[in-house]
Image (cartoon, rainbow, N blue to C red):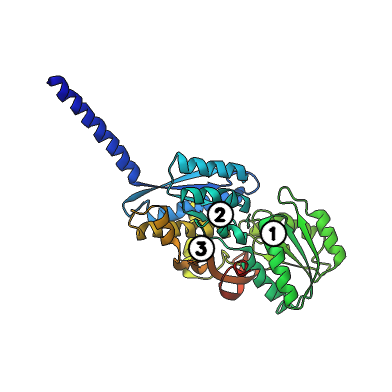
Amino acid sequence: MKKRVFLSASALAVMALSSAAVLAQDNTFKIGLILPMTGQQASTGRQIEAAAKLYMAQNGDTVAGKKIQLIVKDDTSIPDVTKRMAQELVVNDKVNVLAGFGITPSALATAPIATQSKTPTVVMAAATSSITQASPYIVRTSFTLPQASVSMADWAASKGGMKKVVTLVSDYGPGIDAEKFFKDRFIFNGGTIVESLRVPMRNPDFAPFLQKVRDAKPDALFVFVPSGAGAAVMKQFLERGMDKAGIKLIGTGDITDDDQLNDMGDGALGVVTAHHYAAAHPSAMNKKFVEAFKKANKGMRPNFMAVGGYDGMRVIYEALKATKGQGGGDALLAAMKGQTFESPRGPMFIDAQTRDVVQNIYLRKVERQGGELHNVEFDVIKDVKDPGKSK
Ligand code: PHB
């Protein structure tokens, strides 16, 4: 008799323990943030991690009764590694949401895992148009190359007064998008593309390509390279005296990346780009964001990657609130679609049909402002949907 009582007491204790464990797990909401923290794209990882942590510091780490746990993994921007990490995060860590993705191949490698496990996956950096079509569980808070490139082509052909342009892009998804959408629109506007050059994505040497551009003598060189590579392009562009030869540098805002711009020197002054975010964006919300970001990160200036991360966290937090902490993957996904809010970049919207970001694209010129180099906005195209989706 005594023994039975003892057994059931310990059985009860075990039960109590395991339900406490279940409860603890139920009360945790896990975000698996996969980023390139080392290697060529490390600045993207550094910016997005800092932004995600700032968002959590500002908005608390308990949402709808759940304790938010951010699990950061370094994929070194190797897509096979991204995929393995996504799998481990889903299967072992049982994350509720996947997020991050510094480059397009990493986002595409993860898409099948998002679909199979029904895990909402927030793409905070990668920007090839087709990414959101690779899985119905992908939502994007960064931008698309067609958004920026079409806007650039319109400005170049009209106010820019440019007639002949050479394009130079990184030879992979976003570069191909940038080239195609700039080219089609520029030709549609009456311009001529003299030559289209593609440089390797990994360890690019721009010198031989820039020599070709000099020889072609266009009015302008349109460039896309991924965040982190802009300073190298600028340096070689200036070293070869392209600006003195009367060739203007234009591009998507990836080349005048706020992460590097201040170190590019006065040679960058006057470069016009089209993009969705500038640290100099003159809104009260952005001023607060930039100040808080710098304060939390030893003066580091946030770039467009940081904003993609910050807004991505916002989309996750609001989805968790809307589902009162009770929703699975499908409910969370539904609550991400259609979110409309003010971002440090300006107004933005997650299109419920495409799950892609709709946002303003700004024309900006590099100027000295408050003793620093900045992308200063001088024109805006409002509520730009991804032009890649209508094709
Ligand atoms: C991408 O790989 O999709 C990508 C990376 C960096 C950028 C833009 C796009 O600046």
Secondary-structure class at tag 2: loop
- Residue beneath the point at 58% across and 65% down: 278
Q: Give the vertical position of 99 relative to 224 (above or below).
A: above
Which mark's residue is nearer the viewer, 2 or 1? 1
Distance (Cα) linking label 1 and label 3: 22 Å
- Residue beneath the point at 55% across and 51% down: 111
- Residue beneath the point at 75% across and 61% down: 168
Secondary-structure class at tag 1: helix
Q: Which numbered tag is attached to residue 175? A: 1
Residue underneath mark 3: 355
Q: Which numbered tag is attached to residue 45? A: none
Labelled pair 1, 3 in contact (Cβ < 8 Å): no
Which mark's residue is nearer the viewer, 1 or 3? 3
State the image coordinates of residue 318 (x, y, percent, origin top left): 40, 60
Q: Residue furthest right?
A: 215
- Residue beneath the point at 22% across and 27% down: 10
Q: Which of the 4 image quadrants contains residue 263?
A: bottom right
Quadrant (top left/top right/bottom left/bottom right) for the N terminus: top left
Residue underneath mark 2: 300
